Image (cartoon, helix red, strand yellow):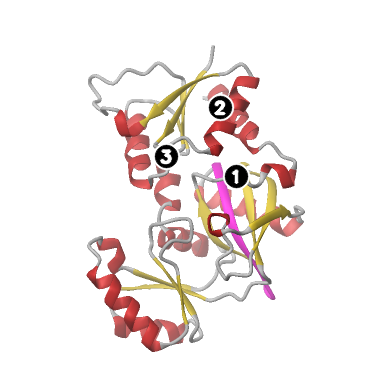
Amino acid sequence: MVRIALLHSTIRKEEKLILESALKRGIDVKIVDIRKEIFDPLNFKTDFDIALERSVSTVKGDYAISFLESIGILVINSSKISRICGDKFLTSLLLSKAGIPTPRFALVFDFGKALEAVEELGGFPVVLKPPLGSWGRLLAKVNDRDSLEAIFEHRDLLGNPYHKAIYIQEYIKKPGRDIRAFIVGKEVICAVYRESEHWITNTARGAKTRNCPLTEELIEIGKGVAEAIGEGLLALDIFETDEGLKVNEVNHTMEFRNSEEPTGVSISGAIVDYCLKILKEK
């Protein structure tokens, strides 16, 4: 019998849905809490065929993936995808290089250069993000120089060196929503609108979801992202603009608890099926 290792740091609704989908397909799942493992290449015992990485912690997940790949275990998503998608600046660089529409951006380490970057991006307001992070945390819409200077001072006092790198993105005025599209392999399987009166349209911050039709433009952008970053399990955060759709971010450990019902698509089932497909092609 095929056995999938579900790598996690906490069991969320998404992991429960994946477990239910695996059970329906008669697939055995080993639940692996990576916080409690000893990743020793000489003594680590593998009693599974493929691993599905679902850790909340990007750092812990990256190390777990790299370790398992080093001893010959196939992991979804790969370490390459995890490292790219775990860093907003690297993601933006790759999207831009591939010609995929994305908001304009810059990275700086100095307040004076930040002011220059803001001008190059079209002026205030702009959005400041930490290169690493999720759930809309530490995002700031910056409307003027004073606010920008205050944020620089605060970030300078934080201990994490990643907070010293300031990722600046042009502010996109949204129509009260954005789009989250789900990619399995190279195919966009469904999408939702995330609607909120707040400028941050994230379900972790209270946004509501409803089904978003899959247009030709949306499907083509999804295929382009999969080709640029790699085939796997991805969720795209997409803005609607006067110039067309623009990819804001790409997530490699996607949350989908609020997306299965409005779309009518079993995202968890598609994830399990994809693991089986990749294992057969191995």
The N terminus sits in image quarter: top right
Please name the residue shown 38% across and 62% down the image.
131
Q: Nearer the viewer, residue 79 or 158?
A: 158
User: Does the segment drawn in magenta span residue 238?
Assistant: yes
Q: Position of residue 230 (x, y in %)?
A: 51, 45
On screen, 136 above or below 4?
below
74 vs 195, left or right, is: left
Tag 2 secondary structure: helix
Residue 19 tag number:
2
Q: Is mark 3 in CB contact (under 8 Å) with mark 2?
A: no
Please name the residue shown 44% across and 19% down the image.
48
Q: Is mark 3 in CB contact (under 8 Å) with mark 1?
A: no
Please name the residue shown 35% across and 30% down the image.
68
Q: How many marks?
A: 3
Which amino acid is tagged 2?
A: Leu
132 vs 19, left or right, is: left
* Picture quadrant where residue 244 is located: bottom right
**Residue range of the region highlighted in magenta in the rendering:** 232-245
Which amino acid is tagged 3?
A: Ser
On screen, 154 above or below 182?
below
Q: Which residue is labeled 3 in the image?
A: 55
Q: Which residue is labeled 1 in the image?
A: 256
Which of pointers 3 and 1 lies earlier in the amino acid sequence? 3
* Picture quadrant where residue 165 is located: bottom left
